[in-house]
Amino acid sequence: MTAERDFVQAHTEELLADLDAFLRIPGISAQPEHAEDVRFSAEWLAAAAQRTGFPTVEIWDTAGMPAVFAEWRSDDLDAPTVLVYGHHDVQPVDPLELWHADPFDPTVEGGVLRARGSSDDKGQLLFHLLGVRAHLAATGRTSPAVTLKLLAEGEEESGSPHFAELLRAHRDRLDADVVVVTDTGMIAEDVPSTVTGMRGMVVCTVRFHGPDMDLHSGSFGGAVPNPATEIARLVAALHDGAGRVQVPGFYDDVLELSEQERALLAKIPVSDAELLATAHSRALAGEAGYSSVERLGARPTAEVNGIGGGYQGAGNKTIIPRDAFAKLSFRLVADQDPGKIQQAVERFVAEHTPDGIGATVAWEGEGVPPCLVPLDTPAYRALTEAISTAWDGREVLPTREGGSGPEALIQRAIPAPMVFLGAGLPDDQIHAPNEKVSLTMLYRGAEAAAHLWRNLGALGPDGLGRT
């Protein structure tokens, strides 16, 4: 038992009370009707940071939804500066009928808290507020051992469209010696881990236009191209029989896993059966030659998110539809460039567009670059030591996150080592109905954060290997 853990366990009721209040705010950044709720969410978090003791707390309206910035300078003149990143906005709740209870009426049962945002990312933001208090109580300090900065974005769940602008506008205020991302998870409650890479992403809608009106299939079928048939052929051509993406040049820049990384990923105790159960799927699929764990975080993918065209109602309407579409997303790994992938996909679509079909490719923004964390930095060692201490000395395994976020934008803006301290679990149902979080994970996350500030403070800025 550590002094940090003693403090956390003595103050769990305060954390639960804050969670209950914070999670009741429907701060859905993707829906304009909830813009005022996102602002209220920022105001609530700013007030919570002030109650925690942060002397400087601001709400930034540089662009898009409001972000929260807090800073607590260390009394130690040679203390390193740490920036903690998370987000206070949440995903939409649709379909509402699949929730067991009101998504913004938090419920606790059996050590599990259910509500939208409980895991992604409000619970993780709040364990940091408890963690800094635990750090101060355990060390007897009146200020943290590091100069601590907190940045809570307000539109991560709507694609961070203005985040790069926010980073540029406040670059001097956000400077740090190390960045800690707290918007990820671990393998299991009893298997401590940390994310070492996040995939990037580009997303598009491909539209095929054929005749200028729907045509009677008896009169014109077999004589003119069918956009729905051709979009299906395009989608089918995306992969070969071994699950490998067939867009020319797609793998050209992929940074392959080292033997050390493959050996470490092989230690992750997640069986294919467990993965199937979590996914509620009946079979596994993917690129041949790689394990499921490797496919999920360390390999790039092409996915069909939606496909349609023509008549969708009851019964039959025998037509050749004038239009069809496919919604595609491409997850990218280290060294892949979103712009190059977009160009490659556009060439692929052009090569698979037959005569008589007009094709358009509409991209959702510039895409998100992938992010990779080296395993040999002092910051990474300080993090894994902190997590291990909170998990009673267990080995901390590196993982790759299959999702995408703005971490690569932070890496580009702030030339400092990055590490990930997240407390979510694979079955937390983030982005889905009945999102939940394990309270034990939040408590341990708070303890790990408290240990981390002590560890990083002992290193000092010169010992962090900032580039």
Image (spheres, rainbow, N blue to C red):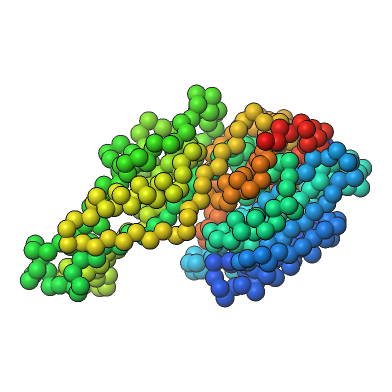
Residue 347 percent location from the top left of the image:
30, 49
Residue 454 percent location from the top left of the image:
81, 38
Image quadrant in which the C terminus is located? top right
Q: From the viewer's perspective, tell me whether residue 458 is left or right of residue 225.
A: right
* Residue 281 visible at all: no
Q: From the viewer's perspective, tell me whether residue 233 is left or right of residue 158.
A: left
* Residue 360 visible at all: yes
Quarter of the image where one finds residue 208:
bottom left
Residue 123 percent location from the top left of the image:
68, 55
Question: Nearest the camera: 20 or 419?
Answer: 419
Residue 293 in the image: above or below residue 33: above
Question: Nearest the camera: 400 or 460?
Answer: 460
Image quadrant in which the N terminus is located? top right
Task: Write the residue at 17% across / 62% down.
Answer: 356
Quarter of the image where one finds residue 250:
top left
Q: From the viewer's perspective, tell me whether residue 149 is left or right of residue 102.
A: right
Residue 196 in the image: above or below residue 369: above
Task: Write the residue at 54% across / 24% down.
Answer: 260
Question: Nearest the camera: 385 or 113?
Answer: 385
Task: Write the residue at 24% across / 63% down.
Answer: 358
Task: Write the residue at 63% across / 65% down.
Answer: 63
Q: How many marks?
A: 0
Residue 122 percent location from the top left of the image:
67, 57
